[in-house]
Amino acid sequence: MATINKPKILVVGAGAVGGFYGGKLAQAGADVSVICRSDYQVVAEQGFEIQSCWGDFRFNPTRVLNCVDEYDDYPDYLIVALKALPELDLPDLISGVVGPKTSVVLLQNGINVESLTAERFPNSEIISGLAFICVNRLGPGKIHHMDYGRLALGRYPYGKSTAAEDIAELFKQSGVPCSISEDIITERWKKLVWNVPFNCISVLGGGLDTRAILGTPDSVEFVRKVMVEVCAVAVATGHPLDLEVIDRNINDTIAMKPYRTSMLLDSEAGRPMEIEAIVGNVVRIAEGYGIDTPRINCLYSLLSLHCR
Amino acid sequence: MATINKPKILVVGAGAVGGFYGGKLAQAGADVSVICRSDYQVVAEQGFEIQSCWGDFRFNPTRVLNCVDEYDDYPDYLIVALKALPELDLPDLISGVVGPKTSVVLLQNGINVESLTAERFPNSEIISGLAFICVNRLGPGKIHHMDYGRLALGRYPYGKSTAAEDIAELFKQSGVPCSISEDIITERWKKLVWNVPFNCISVLGGGLDTRAILGTPDSVEFVRKVMVEVCAVAVATGHPLDLEVIDRNINDTIAMKPYRTSMLLDSEAGRPMEIEAIVGNVVRIAEGYGIDTPRINCLYSLLSLHCR
């Protein structure tokens, strides 16, 4: 750590992703507190028990709080690991703990999830982050990290950032592969190339894992065409992707164990899905740039009807 | 009846549609037998009990048979009221009862449902028919006709037909509104303008009736765009539709009681859906003419995955 000896970190949304990465930062010596609503009682008493394919560990946060305002301090890093849902007014939620030197790290899915926070805190460093991880909450305070775990971080909207480099270093000290990008939005588009088709089709196809989605040549072609539309929007916004990303995504997904997407798990559990962050924002961005994305629009319309 | 005094009619597929229209023809004096597989026992003993918004009636077929080959005669009209499913080899099923003077009446949903039958029986009159009716099977031999009931008939692939005129006359004698078209395929496309969006979205949207499908301005716009694609394919095949059909379909559907499509009822009951006749054939016809139908392709891909 170049600039801060024992950084103070507050994790907002200590579910599976927040609890896991918060725990890794604590392993690296950071002072990590968590905001934990539904599981507050258990986590406050027992901390987190984390089964990880990298080695099981326990995570006892410095402080476990029920709501953000109880923190009563400004952290060096505020890590947001909440689902990106339109009903969440994130800037309002965190306004009391974003101090003059606080960097806000948004570990969230989708595209354009940073803009409201960046507008509300124009003088704060916003670090946009992507977690490539299979991790589930087994129960209150119980987390199961099954596979992967890499992070990609970068200054929002682009560029270099000492704060991003420092926290990436801390992640790496704890064993989390963590890359820094000076163009993190391009990284978000790359992840969307996978997320849009597989999340949407897993739900709309009637509850399918990745193997079922790629089960026929016709369905592979369908996935590919959706991916092409995502790439077209990325190009239009000034974030061109190597089209080779499409074949790689498809081949990697065929090779991996059948996987059930987060949207499918949310749908089956009756929880809100990240439809707007993952699909709706792509549709709106495409409209703004005059790009025709009929398949993505079709998926978005069906999902919007699905969750009414 | 100009040409036949008491026509012999055999109804293949005596479910709700076949039982209802067979019963109406019997009311008009025709000699109507039925092939009835799952409900054979009850229908053979008791006939059909039909609750109809036009007046309840009973229908006691001349003969009730378990399979086509038992008919042992050639009817004047063979009325096919089976679901249009690819696993059904219809020409093979009916080959034993299509005589030199038999007209085959296909009362089925979708597009291009006639071609295999027309190829197999090149010397037979094929009459293509559309039933605009809300009718359900309540149980063995029990049919509930709730609303509508109009038929549109016409010679396949086009043109005039005395046989079509004769059976239309018989339907009208029994009180069934029945129009004759010299371009019945255009009538099929008109019906598809409604059937493609509402059937597909009712299932893919998670079990929606027509009111829910048209519940927001965005979803109305989505339905409209799917309808525009259907019209584009119809135009390409030489069956131009007045685009006003789109607004009329949407407005009429908004005005009518919430309706659950046949595909949704099939899906919920775990029965095969008419995906190929209603959507798959549209996709294949569009491909053949080089017409881009991304939304219909998207719906077709999702439904194909849905029923795997």
Image (cartoon, coloured by chain):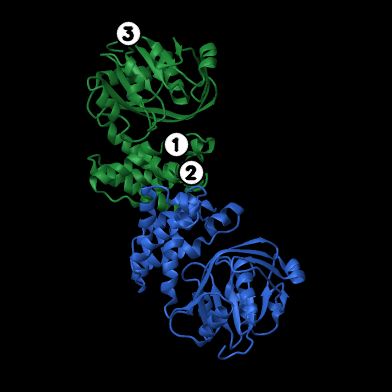
Chain colours: A green, B blue
**B221 horizontally vs B84: left or right:** left
For mark 1, give the secondary structure: loop
Question: What amino acid is at disc 1?
Answer: Met
Question: What amino acid is at disc 2?
Answer: Val
Q: Chain of mark 3?
A: A
Which of the 4 quarters of the picture holds residue A165? top left
Which of the 4 quarters of the picture holds residue B27? bottom right
Q: Is residue A4 above or below residue A193?
A: above
Which of the 4 quarters of the picture holds residue A131? top left
CB atoms at circles 1 and 2 under 8 Å apart? yes
Whether residue A202 is visible, yes or no, is: no
Whether residue B138 is visible, yes or no, is: yes
Q: For residue A273, which numbered disc appears in the image?
A: 1
User: Which residue was labeled with disc 2?
Assistant: A203
The picture places residue A206, in percent across and down from the top left corner, at 52, 47
Q: Chain of mark 1?
A: A
Q: CA distance from mark 2 to mark 3?
A: 45 Å
